[in-house]
Image (cartoon, rainbow, N blue to C red):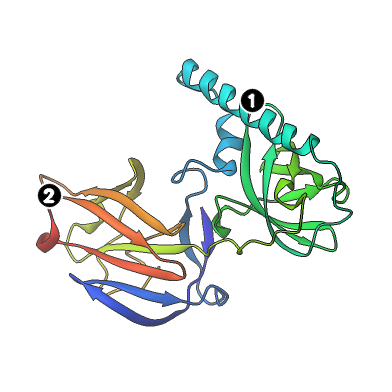
């Protein structure tokens, strides 16, 4: 879990008592709000997830073997492309670049890196700032290639190679990663604290107590979650037979305030 704060600016639309609220991503300074980060939960096709997944035991041995086989094939493709280049760039142009990252065994995946003065300054997986990974550089970029230590957890790092294959023939600047968006679930039912929530099949916990007033994004009594922009499936269940099921769409730089009540139950 990660503590952040949110400055609300204005409501932009409403649908069935649900509201999208614009937020200022740079003004998270006033109130400490617990927000869940989905690096290793939702959107599983990213380096942040793979770093942890391959360090933990896989329940399905065949699944692990298939993943390793796919990674090895991708590693060979990336290295062959790199080695076939006749001339390598002396430096990499300042800006965001799409790269391939590999630990030379478990994974070979795309990421975006910010380069300044031929050094990597930021490293983002899954094309969203929510998946930014802490790292330590091992020297500067040389011949369109770099080495980093990616921080897996407090005690573990992965030594990886970063290939700038898109920049070997000419400099190629790409768009910056996306900003995350948020969803803030709440309920006006008396037993709101018993409502359990799953997103993409993953259990996130129970709502807080019923708010006294209509809450804003991140207020007490809400479950506020951070996600990469996209559409996600959710289900929720209270005591007895009451339940909810559907989808919600995360938009960059907004918070979707989502009311669960008797009017929109299944």
Residue, disc 2? 242
Direction bottom: furthest residue: 10
Disc 1 to disc 2: CB gap under 8 Å: no
Q: If you read the primary sequence from the N terminus, does the residue marked by circle 1 or circle 2 appear first?
A: 1
Residue at image point 80% right, 40% down: 85
**Direction from residue 128 to residue 170 in the image, left or right:** right
Give the distance between the C-alpha atoms of the residues marked 1 and 2, in whole angstroms.
Answer: 47 Å
Rendering quarter of residue 217 = bottom left
Rendered image: mark on residue 261: none
Asked which secondary structure carries label 1, the reply is: helix
Residue, disc 1? 72
Asked which secondary structure carries label 2, the reply is: loop
Above or below, 125 relative to 108: below
> Could you tell me residue 4's position as x and y percent?
53, 65
Above or below, 138 relative to 84: below
How many residues crowd mark 2 within 10 Å: few (<14), some (14–19), many (20+)? few
Above or below, 147 relative to 74: below
């Amino acid at each position: 879990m990660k503590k952040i704060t949110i400055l609300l600016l204005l409501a932009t639309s409403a649908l069935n008592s649900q509201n999208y609220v614009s937020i200022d991503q740079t003004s998270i300074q006033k109130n400490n709000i617990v927000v869940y980060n989905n690096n290793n939960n939702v959107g599983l096709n990213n380096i942040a997830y793979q770093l942890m997944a391959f360090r933990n035991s896989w329940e399905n041995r065949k699944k692990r073997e298939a993943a390793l086989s796919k990674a090895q094939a991708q590693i060979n493709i990336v290295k062959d492309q790199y080695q076939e280049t006749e001339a390598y760039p002396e430096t990499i142009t300042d800006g965001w670049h799409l790269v391939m990252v590999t630990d030379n065994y478990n994974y070979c995946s795309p990421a975006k890196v910010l380069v300044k003065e031929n050094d990597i300054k930021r490293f983002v997986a899954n094309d969203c700032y929510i998946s930014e990974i802490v790292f330590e550089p091992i020297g500067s970029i040389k011949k369109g290639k770099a080495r980093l230590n990616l921080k897996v957890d407090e005690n573990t790092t992965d030594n990886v190679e970063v290939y700038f294959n898109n920049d070997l023939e000419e400099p190629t600047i790409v768009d910056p990663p996306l900003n995350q968006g948020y969803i803030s679930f709440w309920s006006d039912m008396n037993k709101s604290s018993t409502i359990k929530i799953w997103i993409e099949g993953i259990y996130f916990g129970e709502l807080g107590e019923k708010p006294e007033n209509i809450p804003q994004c991140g207020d007490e009594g809400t479950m506020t979650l951070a996600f990469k922009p996209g559409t996600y499936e959710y289900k929720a269940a209270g005591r007895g037979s009451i339940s909810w099921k559907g989808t919600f769409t995360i938009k960059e730089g907004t918070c979707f305030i989502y009311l669960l009540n008797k009017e929109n139950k299944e």
